[in-house]
């Protein structure tokens, strides 16, 4: 698994946007919307890196496109009139599997920790000058909002983390995610 790839940026951005629109922030904290989006982006990023583990996978999805949000929109009862209408073109970059996996991760912090560990285990290593190779990033530390949300994070993302509300989306591809993770 390659971890971050710029080829996945449109998929991550559009899928995060879809998730945040479907499960908006509920907190009264002025930063609630930002905290909600950060958690969604972390879940989407981990799910995208699991789904497209190599640079070649990321490039292929960038060329072919991920499929769009039609099935997700239908499941949530929020089908737009025209996916290609002005301002709705982003929906074509939504990846249904990535959003489903992200919903699974948001509903279950232990599963999220397993997913982050799986991505971190195969993240590229970069030797520091004159030292042994080390991990490029500390992914478990960087994804704390996803794996161990603080009370402020949880308050901002009540809808985004509610297992029952996420089930119509999470249930779409949960089995594939569970099969993939150790």
Image (tube, helix red, strand yellow):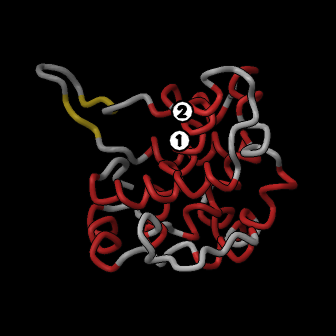
Residue 96 position, x and y percent, is 57, 70
Crowd tier of the residue under label 1, counting other residues whose Cα lies within 10 Å: few below 14, some 14–19, many 20 or above: many
Using the numbered discs, state the Cα–Cα distance from disc 2 to disc 1 in whole angstroms: 6 Å
Q: Quadrant of the C terminus?
A: bottom right
Q: Who's the residue at 69% across and 20% down the image? A: 29
Q: Could you say which quadrant of the image residue 19 lies in?
A: bottom right
* Pointer 2 with pointer 1, Cβ within 8 A: yes
Secondary structure of the residue carrying tag 1 is helix
Q: Could you say which quadrant of the image residue 85 lies in?
A: bottom left
Q: Who's the residue at 18% across and 24% down the image? A: 128
Residue 141 position, x and y percent, is 51, 25
Residue 4 position, x and y percent, is 34, 47
| 127 vs 67: above or below | above
Residue matched to label 2: 143
Horizontal side, residue 20 vs residue 52: left or right = right
Q: Who's the residue at 43% across and 28% down the image? A: 138
Horizontal side, residue 105 vs residue 65: left or right = right
Q: Quadrant of the N terminus?
A: bottom left
Residue matched to label 1: 42
Which residue is more in the foreground, 70 or 95? Answer: 70
| 51 vs 109: above or below | below
Q: Who's the residue at 27% across and 61% down the image? A: 55
């Amino acid at each position: 698994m390659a971890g971050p790839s710029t080829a996945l940026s449109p998929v991550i951005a559009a899928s995060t946007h879809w998730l945040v629109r479907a499960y908006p922030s509920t907190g009264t904290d002025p930063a609630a919307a930002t905290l909600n989006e950060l958690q969604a982006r972390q879940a989407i990023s981990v799910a995208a890196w699991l789904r497209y583990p190599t640079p070649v996978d990321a490039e292929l999805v960038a060329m072919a496109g991920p499929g769009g949000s039609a099935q997700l929109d239908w499941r949530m009862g929020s089908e737009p009139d025209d996916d290609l209408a002005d301002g709705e073109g982003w929906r074509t970059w939504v990846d249904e599997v990535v959003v489903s996996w992200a919903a699974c991760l948001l509903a279950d912090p232990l599963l999220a920790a397993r997913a982050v560990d799986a991505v971190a285990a195969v993240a590229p290593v970069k030797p520091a000058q004159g030292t042994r190779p080390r991990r490029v990033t500390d992914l478990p530390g960087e994804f704390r909002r996803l794996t161990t949300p603080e009370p402020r994070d949880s308050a901002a993302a009540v809808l985004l983390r509610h297992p029952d509300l996420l089930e119509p989306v999470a249930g779409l591809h949960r089995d594939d995610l569970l099969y993939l993770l150790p």
